[in-house]
Image (cartoon, rainbow, N blue to C red):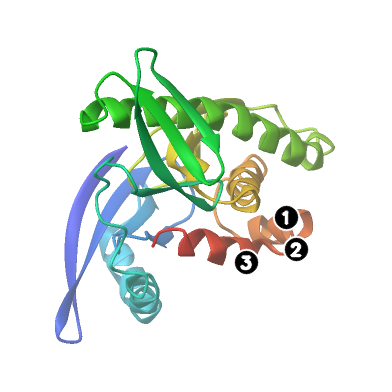
Amino acid sequence: MTITRHALTYGRADLRFELRRVARKTLEIAVHPDGRVVVKAPREADFTEVEARVLKRARWIRRQQAYFEQFKPRTPPRQYIGGETHRYLGRQYRLKLVHGGRPSVKLSRGYFWITCRDPQNREEVRRLLWQWLTQRAREKFAESFERCWPHFSRLGLPHPRLKIRRMKTRWGSLSESGTLTLNVYLIQTPRECIDYVITHELCHLKHPDHSPAFYQLLEKVMPDWERRKHKLELALI
């Protein structure tokens, strides 16, 4: 895959986009929550044609960017201090920091109770909290996958391998080798949003691009996917 960056004049401003040339037959334009425009095109596609397609979708691109813009300002960087709120499965919980010799994290009565030797050590608090959240992500994502998979098992599709890691701009992805990767930060969103991301990626087992056939399958498997998608986007706040 080759990645290049370009800008086109649209109205009074530049329309910037990232062009990824990959092994595919069709061209896809996506607007990410941070406002980035990513264009995936066949390796042999003529750049003039790519430019024309981007300009043709320019009004839609601006609408998508404006849609995501309404959710700013984003949650400020976390400080990992007592009383600060953090999300888990769509709910807000406050940090309660306790001095103790044996490090631990417990969820109780609306609080993350974090015990550590030095509650003032923000890096230690961060490490303990995300160690706990990552372990819960492995458990909850696996449960979600089991809820979503039966729809696709009946289609005779290959069972993907589940992987978890931190990603800056994507909730999930499906590799050509069949690995379903989920963003660990997804553990902060409601269960129905986790199910949506997994279902969305599993649909790519049948349809690798976002063609009409892809959305027909998504609609069939999850009729309320648009509501869930909107709820997931609200989780960006």
Pick the residue in front: 236 or 26: 236
Q: Callout 2: helix, strand or loop? A: loop
**Mark 3 or 1, closer to the camera:** 3
Q: How many marks?
A: 3
| Residue 196, horizontal then vertical, whole percent | 63, 51
Task: Say if mark 2 contacts mark 1, CB within 8 Å.
Answer: no
- The amino acid on which the numbered mark 1 sits, given as a three-letter code, is Leu
Disc ID at residue 226: 3
Task: Say if mark 3 contacts mark 1, CB within 8 Å.
Answer: no
Tell me if mark 2 has few (under 14), some (14-19) or many (20+) residues whose alpha carbon lies within 10 angstroms of its own. few
The Cα atoms of the two marked residues, 3 and 2, are separated by 8 Å
| Residue 198, horizontal then vertical, whole percent | 61, 43
Disc ID at residue 217: 1
Judge left or right: residue 135 versus residue 59.
right
- The amino acid on which the numbered mark 3 sits, given as a three-letter code, is Glu
Q: Callout 3: helix, strand or loop? A: helix
